[in-house]
Image (tube, coloured by chain):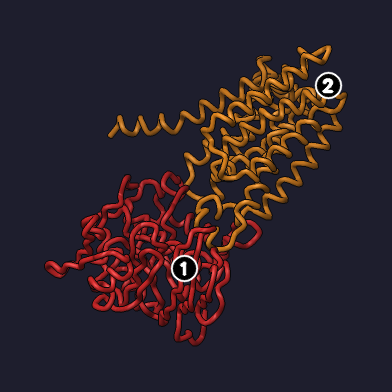
Chain colours: A orange, B red
Amino acid sequence: MALTVAPILSMFDYGFMQHAFIAGTLIAVLAGAVGYFIVLRNLAFASHALSHIGFAGATGAILLNLSPILGQLVITLLAAFGIGIAGNRINKGDLAIGIILAFSLGLGALFLHLNSHYAGQANIILFGNILSVSQQTLKFMFFLTAICLLILAIISRPLLFASLEPELAEAKGLPLTRLTIMLLLIMAIAVTLASQAVGVLLVFTLLIGPAAIATQWTKTFWPGLGLSIAISLGIIWLGLSLSYLLDWPLSFWSSLLVLLLYLLKPLCCLLRLANS
Amino acid sequence: MLITPPVNAIVAHDLSLAYGQQSILHNFTAQIRHGEFIGVFGPNGAGKSTLLKAILGLIRPSQGELFILDKPIKRGNIHIGYLPQMRSQLPYMQFNGRAIIASAKSGYRWGMPILSQAQRQEITRVIELVEAQDYADRPFYQLSGGERQRLLLGQALLDNPQILLLDEPLANLDPRYQESLLDLVQRLQQLLKITVLFTAHDVNPLLGVMNRVLYLARGNAALGTVQQVITSEQLSALYQAPIEVIRYQQRLFVMSKERGIIDYGAHCCPHSEHV
């Protein structure tokens, strides 16, 4: 037993792995909680949009010699506000949305091209690199996570009501648009932080994956939220350990774990059908 | 809860409602007494849902006044229970009925959705009122249309409303479920001594249940007993076109010379949500 555990524990000897675990834990808790509300509110498409738009923000910031995470955060917050204001006029299947998102990736490609040493940067922004999180970034992440969770706690009750029954919630006098904008702004922060771990292309994995799996297995709010955070934590911790042991990137492991866990429920249903 | 319920549940005085430039209802004056069961009818777009929204305080009258329990309309009136017609998010919900009802309990307050013992008891109380104990803890998407409607009716009864607004609760239900839901609403109305406004397409299922009829057509409205309102003369005046009401085996049929049968029962189900 000691033989198998020892190499895993040795990863905590490294400062960058300690940082990665702390950052990963913050990201997992935030993504699990925010993601659960995103799934309930049916806004998964918006997280996808925000992560793509963030790519242009991060690459643009590098070009201007600013911190990429800051550039990404500002752009996604602005985009979140825009999506919230546009509200129901945005059709998820709209071709215009796809074209705008493609343009934001294209813009990112241009910014990278204008930058002299772009190849490595592109890889980090697209697929994340949690192993290079600095002490300063860690403090920034902690601060943002705390703010998001605090706001989420304050708005969670009306947000839950508005998510399940928008028609009734509106009749009861709830400000639906304002609530959605608040969730989108929190989402923008969560998307930015999650992309530090898995990159803008795989934000879906951390933000939507655990929440979607949690809704498969739960029938009420608190167990659903708890399971979403637990799965998110499990994926990050296991993914980090696997990437340390086997050297494949966290982005790959987390997306694989989400896929496997997501397939568990349909598999169980099939087995039950076969048995009966 | 009110200690002495007011005599009038809803009073409209020279009320006009409009969506932007489009006039929906004009110069409507009526009094609905507390404890009445009012059936609200009329063709699509006649303003049934708009009237309910005005009562809820979601739409400001373009003219005239509207009083609820002797007070001016206001948004978020806790004395009104409401069952919306549209349910965009619920049909695929993994949540169970109890959790969905719970989301509405104090759902307008800030904070986290943690329920006290008393609040959980209130949720159990309304589930028992609508006799939904057997399936209140099953995932909502697995329930039949009738079971869902009962749970949502229970939700509308949270916090003892004085007035219950039910917007097309019979739509998408088959006749057997329609009858049992109507029977339940009537029993609850008498038990809880509340005012009910019940919109529907077909007058016939409600004939033995409602005290009076509110009929809306072409911006006009008439309030009275079935004998007063569902007549060829009265409806012709409302529609401003020749209308004939035909009685056949205790059932009423509203006919238009140009368009055939207007009230045809449950003809408005392009897609049923029944699983």
Of B234 and A68, nearer the camera is B234
Of A207 and A240, nearer the camera is A207
Image mark 2: chain: A
Where does the image place residue A208, in percent across and percent down from the top left? 58, 35
Q: Which residue is mark 2?
A: A63
Where does the image place residue A102, in percent across and percent down from the top left? 63, 23
Q: Label 1: state its secondary structure.
A: strand
* Quadrant position of residue B46: bottom left
**Considering only vertical position in the picture, is B71 above or below B153?**
below
Q: Residues within 10 Å of mark 2 (few under 14, many from 20)?
A: some
Residue B36 is left or right of residue B26, and the answer is: left
Of A164 and B95, nearer the camera is A164
Of B75 and B241, nearer the camera is B241
Can residue B121 be seen in the rendering of this structure?
A: no
Q: Are marks 1 and 2 in contact (CB under 8 Å)?
A: no
Q: Label 2: state its secondary structure.
A: helix
Q: Quadrant of the C terminus of chain A?
A: top left
* Quadrant position of residue A249: top right
Q: Residues within 10 Å of mark 1 (few under 14, many from 20)?
A: many
Where does the image place residue B195, in percent across and percent down from the top left? 40, 76
Where does the image place residue A42, in percent across and percent down from the top left? 54, 42
Say what amino acid the circle numbered 2 marks.
Answer: Leu
Can residue A180 be seen in the rendering of this structure?
A: yes
Say what amino acid the circle numbered 1 marks.
Answer: Gly
* Quadrant position of residue A18: top right
Q: Residue furthest left?
A: B249
Real-space CA distance between mark 1 and mark 2, rounded to the nearest whole angstrom: 57 Å
Q: Which residue is mark 1?
A: B81
Of labels 1 and 2, the one closer to you: 2
Q: Residue at x 36, y 46 (%)?
A: B142
